Amino acid sequence: MLYYTIKADGKKAGRFENVVVGEEMGPFTYPVDDYSVKAYSFAVDDYSPWYYTDNNPFGKRIAHASFPCNDCLSIFLTVFEPSGVMGLHTEEEIWFHNPIFVGEDVTISAKIVDKFEKRGKGHWCFETKLVGEDGRPIIDTRSTEIMHFEASELTEEKKAKITGAVVTGEYDKTKAPVKKGTADVTPGTPLVSLTKIFHPEQAQIYSWVGQHFKNIHDNLAYAKEAGYDNLVVQGMQQLGCMCELLTDFYDANWFTSGHLKMKMIRTVLVGETITFHAVVKSVEKENDRNKVHLDVWTLNEKGQMTTIIRLGKRLRGLIYSKNTSIDL
């Protein structure tokens, strides 16, 4: 994992004025080993045999599709002092190209591409690339964060405005839900939902507890100092659970041609029950194949949306062969 390269000192303070457009981060190379894949499985509660054996469509043991996403986001901690950053992750766009094979070294690099002020808050964006040891592209991401804030500064109303209503969460509940995508799936079809409860140890493992720096995800005292009642579950950790649902539906296609745009609406705390939902938004014919688009969202135990994903027309994949059903 990337934390092998992150030190606790010698970095810039995590302040908006210290964000420099054009600044590059990396490249850094690190191994994807058995321990890190098992730790990730625990953190997102996904123990599919694909990640423990070679019994998968790629014929070799692989890591979860979302395995490198936290590294792609956290690469900025190689520039900014890790324990001093109080950021709010608001939006993420991800392109999946190839799976990671367990045992290989991967290389990650990033560049700050934008900074701007919105509603009195300093936002910044950076783009990250991760490649395999043979140079093949694995994942590209674009991350947007608010640099430095206090929890008390963000009311639920302001959070909703930051995100905007893109995915409604409405669908025909009389339709039977499906788990696997097929060539004959129709718009309006819901997916089988997925429910998770994040435990403190999962949030801490995901956020690199013990790596000589603290944050609102792994240190309770620090989270309370920031105004939260419990540890904060990372948006990327929620993404890991979403990718479990999407891998079940799209099969191997998710690793090689998946694309999503995710926005975080409300904070999720450890101990809350979160349910992941999706519905087929549209199906497009593309030559002899179908391109299937989904809306994906999460609801907390109060029925409030916490995260939304739009899989729109810009998707480069998520395609099934005509008259063919995709099965694990």
Image: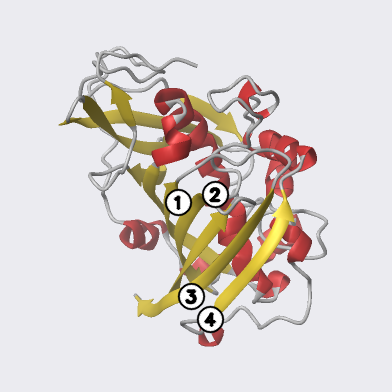
Q: Secondary structure at mark 2?
A: helix
Left or right of residue 315: residue 297: right
**Looking at the picture, how far across and down is residue 258, in whole percent?**
40, 40
Is residue 304 visible in this depiction of the protein? no
Is residue 157 visible in this depiction of the protein? yes
- What amino acid is labelled 3 in the image? Ile
Query: Which image quarter: residue 276?
Result: top left
The residue lying toward the viewer, choosing from 58 and 146, is: 58
- What amino acid is labelled 1 in the image? Arg
Asked whether disc 1 touches disc 4, contact meaning CB atoms under 8 Å apart, the reply is no
| Among numbered discs 1 and 2, the one appearing first in the sequence | 2
Q: For marks 1 and 3, give the CA distance.
A: 25 Å
Q: Residue at x 74, y 67 (%)?
A: 6
Q: Which residue is under mark 4? A: 23
| Among numbered discs 3 and 4, the one appearing first in the sequence | 4
Asked whether disc 3 touches disc 4, contact meaning CB atoms under 8 Å apart, the reply is yes
Q: For marks 4 and 2, give the CA distance.
A: 23 Å
- What amino acid is labelled 4 in the image? Glu
Q: Which residue is under mark 1? A: 266
Q: Which residue is under mark 2? A: 236
Query: Which image quarter: residue 163?
Result: bottom left
